[in-house]
Image (spheres, grey):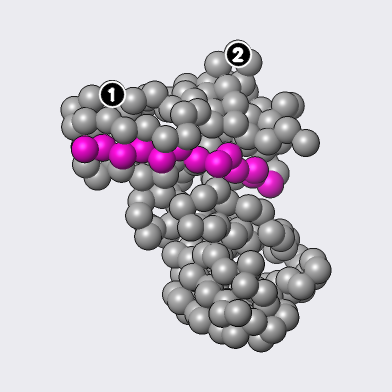
Amino acid sequence: SQQGEEDPQALSIQEGENATMNCSYKTSINNLQWYRQNSGRGLVHLILIRSNEREKHSGRLRVTLDTSKKSSSLLITASRAADTASYFCATTPTSGTYKYIFGTGTRLKVLA
Amino acid sequence: AAGVIQSPRHLIKEKRETATLKCYPIPRHDTVYWYQQGPGQDPQFLISFYEKMQSDKGSIPDRFSAQQFSDYHSELNMSSLELGDSALYFCASSPPRDTQYFGPGTRLTVL
C-alpha cells in the first residue's frame, strides 16, 4: 500500500500565483523528496529534505516537513506555465531498504 | 553529466509475449531500483539490487524477474505479458542509501 498521499490531486492556477501541494505519509522516514513529472515523461528530482530538517529552499521552491504530523508541503512561488506537471513526494522509511514510496501526485496546471 | 539510460524507450508487445527492459546506471552508482507507473498512477516499487544482489522486493509479479550484472547494468524480464502490464517502467540508480536518479523510462504497451 502506498504511504504517501497528496493533496490536492489537481490544482489549476494563474501564472504568477503561488502553488502549494501537500503530502502525508504514515511511517517514520529518513527523508522526503519531491519530484516533478511532465506528462508521461521521466521523474525529475526537485528537492530533498531530511527528517531532522523543517524547511528547505531551492530557487522558487520551498519545502516544509513536519514529522510530528507526518506531512510535507511544496510551495512553488511565482508560478510559470512551464511548471505545469505532476508533482510527487517520495519517502524513504527508516525501516528496510532505501526504496521510495511515492504519493499519488498532484497535477498542477499553470494557466498563462 | 551522465544520466541513467534505459532501453528501449518504447516497446509494443502482444499478450503472452516476453519483454526485456534494460537499465544502465550512472557510473559509480551500485544500487539500481525498478518502478512501474500505470496510467494516471504513482510509481510503484518493483525490485532493487545492490552490488549485484537483490536487496528488496516490492509488488513485482512472479512473471517478472530481474538481475544486475557485473557492470552494474540491470535487466527486467517480463514474461506472459498481460494487458495490465502496460505502463511506464522506470529505473533509478544511486550510491548506497542516497538520492535516486531516474531514467527517462520505458513505455511498454501490451496489445
Q: Is residue B42 magenta?
A: no
Task: Please indicate whether residue B14 sits to the left or right of residue A101 in the image.
Answer: left
Q: Using the rendered image of the protein, determine whether residue B43 is visible from the camera's viewpoint.
A: yes
In the picture of the structure, the residue carrying the numbered disc 1 is B18
Q: Secondary structure at mark 1?
A: loop
Q: Nearer the viewer, mark 1 or mark 2?
A: 1
Q: Is residue B54 visible in the rendered structure shown here?
A: no
Left or right, A52 with respect to B100, comes to right
Q: Magenta stretch: residue B105 in it?
A: yes
Classify the position of the C terminus of chain A by image quarter. Answer: bottom right
Where residue B20 sits, quadrant-wise, is: top left
Q: Residue at x 55, y 48 (%)?
A: A42
- Pointer 1: residues within 10 angstroms few (<14), some, or many (20+)? some
Q: Is residue A85 above or below residue B95?
A: below
Residue B85: % across, % down? 29, 41
Front-most of A101 and A78? Answer: A78
Q: Residue furthest left?
A: B16
The quarter of the displayed image where residue A53 is located: bottom right
Chain where mark 1 sits? B
Q: Mark 1 is on which residue type?
A: Thr
Q: Residue at coordinates 55% horizontally, 41% vertically from top-left? A: B104
Residue B100 position within the rendered picture, expressed as x and y whole percent measured from the top left: 64, 44
Q: Which residues are magenta?
A: B99-111
Question: Between disc 1 and disc 2, whose residue precedes?
Answer: 1
Image location (x, y in percent) of residue B54: 50, 27
Query: Of the numbered discs in the image, which one, if any, rests on residue A32?
Result: none
Residue A60 placement (x, y as % from top left): 76, 73
- Residue at the spot of label 2: B70
